[in-house]
Image (spheres, coloured by chain):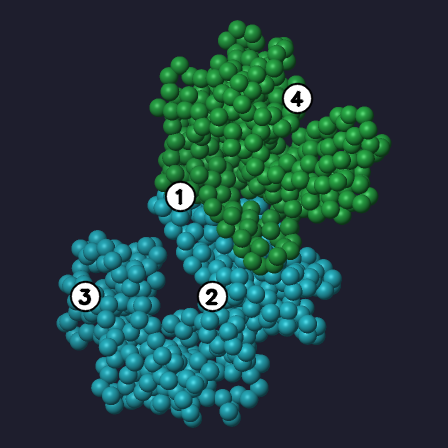
Chain colours: A green, B cyan
């Protein structure tokens, strides 16, 4: 017998027919003698519809009332799944965030989970029942409804799994696992049987949005194994686990887990910066204050008597805001020109194996150079190397690297 | 300064534009220095949509989970109205049934309000705030969401008004008041400035569904004045008050308040019943057990040696169910034939004035007889006379009676 938290996203909950299929999957786990709690999202499109209503009601809407409105989407699917499970003879009941309760901070629309009382859930498990819990929502100590921010249901599921010390958290989504890269670009991409939390975080940070980043961070802290799998097929998915849970560290595991890319960054270059202490701080401090998330940063090393250039990336959505801020401090900083370019892409190779293997970055640069792909910037972490390239080379770069690191499947995996 | 509970139905809440209009009406009352609490229904059509989802999920759905699902409709409109009011500078907040709380019985999908804690509302009034409260929903002592049954928001509003000792409860709907009869049938029908609770109950029981019957009964018990008015025009509506609140009892007030009709009943006749004690009880006891709501009952008085017929009415929706029950007990009862007829209509004259005036019923029978309208059955209460007639005479009968009791407006009221 295992204790499992199952989480189903909006696509899996979109309509009664799909909810019935979800109920089949839940019943199967319960029939195996497992203790099951289910976390559900709102029907696909419903949260967008509710957010839109709030925006129409007032352009600067109160986030407390926004939470009341948007939390209703998961309330509906929770009740419907409980009804459907009961119709199949499963002893199921729904429990809203305020009923369990799932205590959160008061940061409405972006609340953090403080603690989940496991008493109610332990009692349900003891009675052989299945608890159906709306994701995305919680309640403050004062009894106000909160939501966790978009995509928060993954985090709800992991937090509940941690609270009840579940054996694992199964996250059902519309993809069937984590791949070595985007199968739309590389048909020979392979589904990974297992990745570490850190790899998952690095893959997510560079565009592979299978799980909400926050939920992976929480799972890592709580050491809660996650399984990513599809509700639409029956094959095993990808396990996301701690480093220590991967037994075979050297033999079968690839050096590199995957290749990710992210087209959502823009590049900004400030030319001919004065060579005096504090210049870089004078640029990034006002950007931080303006909530601009700066990613890659490269400063050219000037020759004697010349001035340096500074290049960095920001999310495309923040580009206009960023150039506004930089325009205002131009005289103070004393740069010559500001160049902005949105036709760039970040490509990353990720793998815990590179910790113990030198030469991963060198191999990447060689492979790209051999195809004439120019590298505009580089950043590295312990388990990731990221390069910024011209956007038009994205697909070529991903394919070249996927082959270079031996990730191509024997046969076409897109069967 | 007055303390007012304002209630808005589904048509008034259907979409942001209409919610903005509702917010205008609320702001106007608040700007006058009144203390205001607002009770809202779900958007028109939303509760039907949610009920349908529950039915699709399982034909015999759990009413506890049904309540969780359908209560979401009012949750959404409450939050949206609060957001809209805030956008207009009104200090508004929403409070769900479980937050106030509105304590109800555990009869899910048809819960009764036990008590409403006025403390939270008193504090809001004291702070100059406007509380927005979802109608139709409450919470059990154990913390489970309940709903009051369809149309329950009127009852929520009256119960909240009673709890906070409001000066009146304004119920905004898609008609602008209570009329002497259906203006679609009688263009010279008049809007009544004032009716008593008992008249309203009798009018409702025979088809004039302006207010939920339960809400009128509650208002009568609590002696809470209700105003029925339209959110789409600005004229005063109809006050629904206690007998004692009507000052001028004899002069200006009409003998008869209104003429109502109801086409939702079916007639059943059982012929040649054996003349022995207990026969009637043997018929109506199983019908009561089957939850069939029997209304008019007429037993023919047989001549010596003959057997009696029994005629009664049931809701059309319950006809098939009723004939099933009666078919099963045919041998036990010993009736000859069962005749069912759905082409009947109940027409009623209602007015507290008839208490002190004999001859109201006689005048009714004469007016109908003069037009050749046959009366199939008669029932009376202290302030109502109801006849059952062939459905095809409905409009004629209503017009004849409206004129006979002097209810026609001087000019055409359908301006």
> Contact (CB < 8 A) between labels 3 and 4?
no
* Badge 3 and badge 2 in a common chain: yes
| Residue mark closest to the camera, 3 vs 2 | 2
Name which residue lies at 67% across and 64% down.
B90
> In whole angstroms, how far apart are the C-alphas of marks 3 and 4?
86 Å
- Give percent across and percent down for residue A281: 80, 35
- Give percent across and percent down for residue A216: 59, 28
* Placement of the C terminus of chain A among the 4 image quadrants: top left
Q: Quadrant of residue A353?
A: top right
| Residue mark closest to the camera, 4 vs 1 | 4
Q: Which residue is mark 2?
A: B11
Q: Quadrant of residue B6?
A: bottom right
Instruction: Name the element at disc 1.
Output: loop
* Left or right, residue B399 beside residue A361: left
> In whole angstroms, how far apart are the C-alphas of marks 4 and 2?
58 Å
For the question of whether residue A173 can be seen, the reply is yes
Q: Which residue is mark 1?
A: A15
As rendered, which of B140 and B45 lies closer to the eye? B45
* Badge 1 and badge 3 in a common chain: no
Disc ID at residue B238: none
Chain for numbered disc 1: A
Q: Which residue is mark 4?
A: A381
């Amino acid at each position: 017998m295992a204790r499992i938290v199952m989480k189903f996203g909006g696509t899996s909950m979109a309509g009664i027919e799909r909810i019935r299929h979800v109920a089949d999957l839940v019943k199967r786990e319960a029939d195996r003698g497992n203790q099951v709690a289910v976390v559900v999202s709102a029907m696909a499109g419903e949260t967008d519809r509710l957010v839109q209503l709030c925006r129409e009601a007032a352009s600067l809407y109160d986030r407390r009332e926004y939470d009341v409105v948007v939390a209703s989407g998961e309330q509906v699917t929770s009740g419907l799944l409980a009804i459907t499970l009961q119709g199949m003879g499963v002893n199921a009941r729904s429990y809203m965030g305020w009923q369990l309760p799932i205590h959160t901070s008061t940061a409405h629309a972006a609340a953090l989970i403080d603690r989940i009382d496991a008493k109610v859930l332990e009692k349900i498990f003891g009675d052989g029942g299945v608890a159906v819990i709306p994701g995305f929502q919680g309640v403050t100590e004062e009894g106000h409804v909160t939501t966790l921010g978009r995509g928060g249901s993954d985090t709800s599921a992991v937090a509940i799994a941690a609270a009840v010390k579940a054996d694992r958290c199964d996250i059902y989504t519309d993809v069937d696992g984590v791949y070595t890269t985007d199968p739309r670009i590389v048909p020979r991409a392979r589904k990974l049987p297992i990745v570490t939390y850190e790899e998952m975080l690095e893959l997510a940070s560079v565009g592979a949005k299978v799980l909400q980043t926050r939920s992976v961070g929480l799972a890592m802290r709580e050491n809660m194994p996650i399984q990513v799998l599809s509700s639409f097929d029956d094959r095993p998915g990808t396990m996301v686990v701690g480093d220590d849970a991967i037994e075979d560290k050297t033999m079968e595991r690839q050096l590199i887990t995957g290749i990710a890319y992210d087209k959502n960054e823009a590049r900004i270059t400030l030319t001919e910066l004065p060579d005096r202490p504090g210049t870089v701080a004078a640029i990034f401090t006002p950007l931080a204050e303006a909530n601009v998330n700066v990613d890659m940063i490269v400063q050219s090393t000037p020759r004697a008597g010349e001035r340096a250039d500074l290049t960095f990336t920001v999310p495309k959505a923040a580009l206009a805001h960023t150039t506004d801020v930089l325009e205002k401090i131009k005289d103070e900083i004393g740069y010559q020109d500001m160049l902005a370019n949105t036709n760039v892409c970040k490509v990353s190779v990720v793998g815990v194996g590179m910790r113990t293997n030198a030469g991963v970055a060198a191999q990447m640069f060689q492979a790209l150079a051999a195809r004439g792909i120019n590298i505009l910037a580089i950043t590295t972490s312990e388990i990731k190397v990221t390069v910024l390239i011209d956007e038009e080379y994205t697909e070529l770069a991903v394919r070249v690297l996927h082959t270079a690191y031996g990730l191509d499947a024997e046969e076409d995996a897109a069967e």
